[in-house]
Image: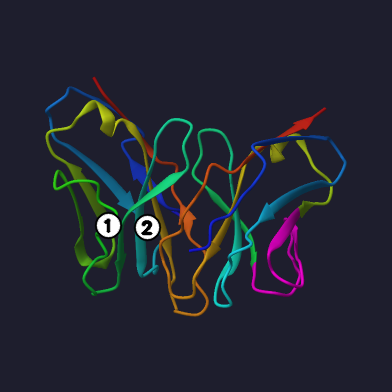
Amino acid sequence: GAGVSQSPSNKVTEKGKDVELRCDPISGHTALYWYRQSLGQGLEFLIYFQGNSAPDKSGLPSDRFSAERTGGSVSTLTIQRTQQEDSAVYLCASSGFTGFPQETQYFGPGTRLLVL
Amino acid sequence: DAKTTQPTSMDCAEGRAANLPCNHSTISGNEYVYWYRQIHSQGPQYIIHGLKNNETNEMASLIITEDRKSSTLILPHATLRDTAVYYCIAADFGNEKLTFGTGTRLTIIP
């Protein structure tokens, strides 16, 4: 497709279960970002991948959160032992990062996660 | 990144120009001003960015004051589809992590 896609669009899970969220970036984009947005709040940066470099994980809120990017394309965000405070919209973005200036980030529609 | 301050909400009549202000008094010389918007239930959408010169594209115009401490996003002929939350972000050169505040909720009134 032409844009960033994410799946599932909605996920309801029980507290303590693990969830995996998927992001397909725009083809050819080397940079991929994960953010989350709690109800009524701004976006919170989680993690950033750029090419083959080590990811910037500085925004991950706890060790229950992890992310991978396989083959420089698709990314999976995993939340282990989910808690109710993990309920949010998880947004993925990609950009064709060339270094100067910061490239425009294109966002997917998000995955709405509800932890019961 | 420099902190930005925006009004919580604004209304604008359909067909009129919507002018959205943003204060970034602590912006540094390397920081660009970016504007994104988020329509309900969608991911954020890039609008425009600039460093110190005014910028215009097919969506909007960005006016940055000479001292760069504030800027204004202008939607020249607002339509109902422009109803969204608008985020003003000051992003450092080389900083890939956009820091979104709570933005301005713009409502276009028919």
Q: Identify which amino acid the numbered label 2 is placed on.
A: Pro
Q: Is residue B5 left or right of residue B82?
A: left
The answer to whether residue B23 is seen in the rendering is yes
Any mark on residue A25, and which? 2
Q: Residue at x 31, y 36 (%)?
A: A8
Q: Work out which quarter of the rendered image holds the C terminus of chain A and state it.
A: top left
Name, please, the residue furthest toward the right.
B16
Mark 1 neighbour density, 10 Å: few (under 14) some (14–19) many (20 or more): some
Mark 2 neighbour density, 10 Å: few (under 14) some (14–19) many (20 or more): many
Q: CA distance from mark 1 to mark 2?
A: 7 Å
Q: Residue at x 12, y 34 (%)?
A: A81
Q: Residue at x 85, y 46 (%)?
A: B17
- Residue, disc 1: A74
x and y percentages locating residue B76 in the rendered image = 83, 51
Tags 1 and 2 touching, CB below 8 Å:
yes
Marked residue nearer the N-terminal end (1 or 2): 2
B53 inside magenta stretch = yes
Name, please, the residue furthest toward the front.
B26
Are the residues under badges 1 and 2 in a single subunit?
Answer: yes
Region rendered in magenta: B50-73
The answer to whether residue A2 is seen in the rendering is no
For residue A6, which quarter of the picture?
top left
Disc 1 on helix, strand or loop? loop
Whether residue B24 is situated above or below residue B80 in the rendered picture: below
Between residue B73 and residue A70, name the one nearer to us.
B73
Q: Is residue A15 left or right of residue B66?
A: left
Whether residue B25 is situated above or below residue B14 in the rendered picture: below
For residue B79, which quarter of the picture?
top right
Whether residue B51 is situated above or below residue B24 in the rendered picture: below
x and y percentages locating residue A38 in the rendered image = 40, 35
* Mark 1 belongs to chain: A
Q: Identify which amino acid the numbered label 1 is placed on.
A: Val
